[in-house]
Image (cartoon, rainbow, N blue to C red):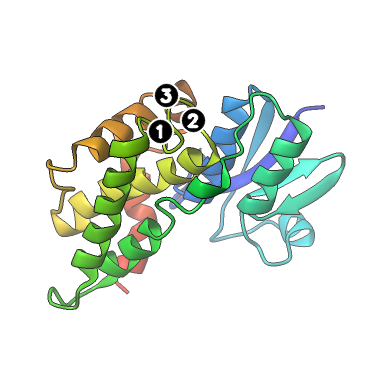
Amino acid sequence: MAVELCVKAASGSPDVLGDCPFCQRVQLTLEEKNIPYKVILINLDDKPQWFLELSPEGKVPVIKFDDKWIPDSDVIVGLIEEKFPDPPLSPPPEVTSVGSKIFLSLIKFLKSKDPTDGTEQALLDELKALDEHLKAHGPYVNDENICAVDLNLAPKLFHLDVTLAHFKGWKVPESLTHFHNYVKLLFSRESFKKTEVAKEYVIAGWEPKVNA
């Protein structure tokens, strides 16, 4: 029985994969472990009743294992690791929090209307910290082997790349060479190419949040 995974459908295009980095994280994990799975697209603007019955909060991703539906990407990724230990993706404790504040810093900078509020610098500081870590321990967060931390970061860094260029005309400084090499490495993986969301849907998904 293939694993079933409910993910976000694209804003305005309910038949196309949407821009949820947490959903893509789970897809990447399944892809890297070569686990067959069936994607069920959920239109978050018009959630079907059956979906609300299995996920009362109406959030994605939700995965079906052994006839049980389980929400929350952190829980899901842990469960996949437990059930399918090969290849192992669990990171060693010392790298689990690498890059963990980047996404929140991105959201604050994207929503900011005040160029002097420090949100840009806060994001830059997080990106520099990741660059320094990769310089010492790269090419992935945990040396040579991809791990769950990379699969969590990859979709978020894709969102960073697309949204900052579109909404802010902003790019990550070229001087962060280890960061740029890392992003290229992640985005060129087969698992990423298979689960990548079209840029226009990433922009459409963020539009209401940025312009709120």
Tell me: residue 108, above or below residue 126: below
Tell me: residue 173, above or below residue 1: below
Label annotation for residue 189: 3
Please give the residue where the numbered disc 1 appears in the rendered image.
140
Please tell me whether mark 2 sits on a helix, a strand or a loop.
Answer: loop
Q: Earlier in the sequence, mark 2 or mark 1?
A: 1
Would you say the residues marked 2 and 1 are in contact, meaning their CB atoms lie under 8 Å apart? yes
The image shows residue 89 at horizontal and vertical percentages of 60, 33
Q: Residue at x 46, y 21 (%)?
A: 190
Q: Which is nearer the eye, 91 or 47? A: 91
The image shows residue 24 at horizontal and vertical percentages of 51, 41
Q: Which mark's residue is nearer the viewer, 2 or 3? A: 2
Q: Residue at x 78, y 34 (%)?
A: 83
Q: CA distance from mark 2 to mark 1?
A: 6 Å
Quadrant the N terminus occupies: top right
- Mark yes or no: residue 111 visible: yes
Would you say the residues marked 2 and 3 are in contact, meaning their CB atoms lie under 8 Å apart? yes
- Mark yes or no: residue 17 visible: no
Q: Amino acid at mark 3?
A: Arg
Q: Amino acid at mark 1?
A: Tyr
Q: Residue at x 61, y 54 (%)?
A: 60
Label annotation for residue 146: 2
Please tell me whether mark 3 sits on a helix, a strand or a loop.
Answer: loop
Q: CA distance from mark 2 to mark 3?
A: 10 Å
Tag count in the figure? 3
